Amino acid sequence: MSATARGWLHRDGGWIPADSLPLTDRGLRYGMAVFETIGIREGKALLPETHSRLLAASAKALLGAEMHPTLPTLDPDDRGVLRIYMTAGDGGPADPPQAPRIFALFEPVAVELPEQQTARLHPEAVFPFAHGAKTANYWMQCAAQASARRAGFDHALLFDHEGHLLSAAMGNVFFTLKGELCTPAPSLALRPGAMRAWVMAEQPVREVEFPARRMEEIGEIFLTNSRLGVMPLQCGKIVPGPVGCALRDGCRREKIIP
């Protein structure tokens, strides 16, 4: 397995090795970029069609650009995550994108995943941004995650200014209410993920606008992302349950995470 990160820039229809962007790029200057994080196992992309669809939708919505590039060639033993970005390119903050840049970053992972992790509700409300598109402006999520880590938790759970549970800082969330599997509704401008789509294809899920102040009604809760797959969470008195554990085992058995 490769032990080092590698980068590429998409140019003239192909990928070339790269380790930097111009300082004039608005992805660097203003966070004006969209991206997807794709799990890689044995050098192959996991859930590639879903990731491609989500990335194309974000690029079209925010940058007005079509985005359907092939992925860079990886080594057969690569295991980790591949992040594909499209930036707004050069220009001022209000200029329309004229020449977006596409780049990729592969990061290896070697840590075995735990069976469960911990989470807490972030104490401050957050503002959902970009109607659910996954953008490079991740400061809000990073700050919430860092705050949770300093407090001794693995993850932060986020709610909006109307009190609705939105997601985890680094993934989508699912939870059970009276035995029914639920997840925050797209109307809350959440960031849809490929693993979210996988769970919703596996079994019935109700999309809801759920008040975070009613967390004590939740039976179990778990997060999803392309690195962890399905991760059951302990959050206060809420402990991992059979639904999340079964889905965790299923995604690991199907080898759809690194």
Image (cartoon, helix red, strand yellow):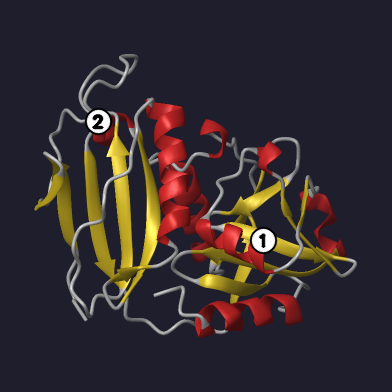
When the figure is inspected, residue 144 is found, relative to residue 40, above or below; the finding is above
**Residue 167 appears in the rendering:** yes
Q: Look at the image and tell me in which quarter the N terminus lies.
A: bottom left
| Residue at the (27%, 65%) spot, across then down | 107
When the figure is inspected, residue 125 is found, relative to residue 48, above or below; the finding is above
> Between residues 110 and 156, which one lies in front from this camera angle?
110
* Quarter location, residue 217: bottom right
Q: Residue furthest right?
A: 178
Q: Look at the image and tell me in which quarter the C terminus lies.
A: bottom left
When the figure is inspected, residue 165 is found, relative to residue 179, above or below; the finding is above
Q: Earlier in the sequence, mark 2 or mark 1?
A: 2
Asked which secondary structure carries label 2, the reply is loop
* Quarter location, residue 202: bottom right
User: Pointer 1: what residue?
Assistant: 200
User: Pointer 2: what residue?
Assistant: 100
Q: What x and y, as percent, mark residue 24?
A: 16, 28
Check if mark 2's residue and mark 1's residue have beta carbons within 8 Å.
no
| Residue at the (54%, 58%) spot, across then down | 171
Q: Which amino acid does label 1 sit on?
A: Met
Q: What x and y, as percent, mark residue 199?
A: 63, 65
Position of residue 117 in the picture relative to residue 55 (left or right): right
Total number of numbered labels? 2
Q: What x and y, as percent, mark residue 247?
A: 64, 76
Q: What residue type is labelled 2?
A: Pro
Label annotation for residue 181: none
**Residue 156 appears in the rendering:** no
